[in-house]
Image (spheres, helix red, strand yellow):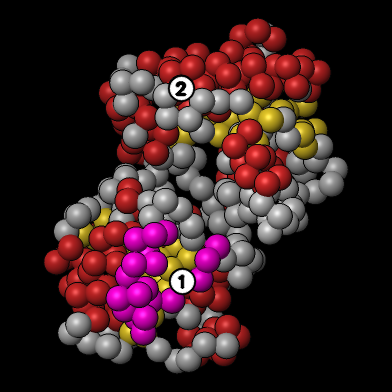
Amino acid sequence: MKLLFISTFLDSPIHCNRAPYNEQLIDRLSEDMDIQVIRPISWIDWLSYITNRRHKKKSIPRKKSILTSYPILFYIPYLGTRINGFLYFLSIFILSFNKVRNADALYVSWLYPDGYAVMLLAQFFKKPYMVQALGSDINELLYNSATKRRVLSVVKNANAVSVVSQDLKNKLIAQGVIEAKISVIYTGIEVSSFYPIEKNIAEQNLGISNKKRILFVGNLKRAKGINDLLVAAGKLYEKRQDFELCIAGSGPEKAFVDQYIKQYPSLIKYLGVVDHHKLHMWINAASCVCLPSYSEGVPNVLLEAMVCETNIVSTRVGGIPEVIANSDTYLIEAGDTLGLIDSLSSMLDKESFVTKPKSIITSYKHMANLVKNKLLTL
């Protein structure tokens, strides 16, 4: 099968660590399929890259045999939500016509605008397509008046749909999507990279001191609970000063993070974007990994933390309760700052690993096999 993978949720010459799970999926699928990639880059990102001389091209951890094109993606920020899916379609149609025409099937990660563009391409070229929903594209876009109808059209017209949690599947079914079309395929992890290491050894490898440590990994946006975590950590630090908060990631709330760093310079350590292959050391050096999100699919960092036997502080949202045993005991409600403070304090003092997985956490290879089997039925 000649498969064409289309998504902005991939690395590019100017984006790194965009979506490691998709990079791993492509790598595994390429072992059994002839796969090519279209990774559009927005005109705004290209303009920023060209005008900022400090930016350097990023290395892409993708096999050279996987041919990838980077067409310029034209869209209208803020005001163009309703037409950006169509503009995405035109960007690929004009600049990658032959790639789409020569493919046997299309695969897209993210429902809108990516999925909407692929739906239009599939209809024009009469190709089957499979769409992967990751979390916010259902949790947020499905309930937005500007995108709901378009998101549902992508799902209902798809030949196959994969979601990363039962919670997301239930939400689609509630909107009238045929249940038989939807497969729950939990994301895998790189099992060769994530495994338990003694905390002191991980700290030595990172060149950091032996200390109790809270680790946040993710997009710095309100929906991920980064603001709640900073507030909670600050209040906890006023009671006890035997820990630090390490933050890995980037995003729109970086200014809020900087504000708290100025207020609590001895508490917060900003790590920037941590290379995914180095992340396991930081997870093993942490007393707990905290992700107090308001909406989620199934966050990979929590799966990786559990494999490393690092305790978790997180919220009872999305697919998170599906993967953590005793979730009623160890998860809190989103927005519960007092509960977050109590959970963080408790986990900082835990000597044993208690937030264990509900079932076996599988590999990217297993995930890719499930996706491949669905694709072969298109």
* Residue 269 magenta-highlighted: yes
Q: Secondary structure at mark 2?
A: loop
Badge 2 density bin: few <14, some 14–19, many ≥20, Cα 10 Å: few
Q: Secondary structure at mark 1?
A: strand
| Quadrant for the C terminus in the image | top right
Residue at 23% in and 69% down? 232
Residue at 57% in and 48% down? 19
Q: Please determine whether, in this image, residue 127 is positioned above or below residue 271.
A: above
143 vs 66, left or right, is left
Q: Name the amino acid type tagged 1.
A: Tyr
The quarter of the picture where residue 144 lies is top left
Spot occupied by residue 340 in the image (x, y as percentages of width and height): 21, 66
Q: Earlier in the sequence, mark 2 or mark 1?
A: 2
Spot occupied by residue 70 in the image (x, y as percentages of width and height): 73, 35
The quarter of the picture where residue 348 lies is bottom left
Tag of residue 80 = 2
Q: Please determine whether, in this image, residue 96 is positioned above or below residue 53.
A: above
Spot occupied by residue 54 in the image (x, y as percentages of width and height): 68, 59
Tag of residue 270 = 1
Q: Which residues are magenta?
A: 254-273
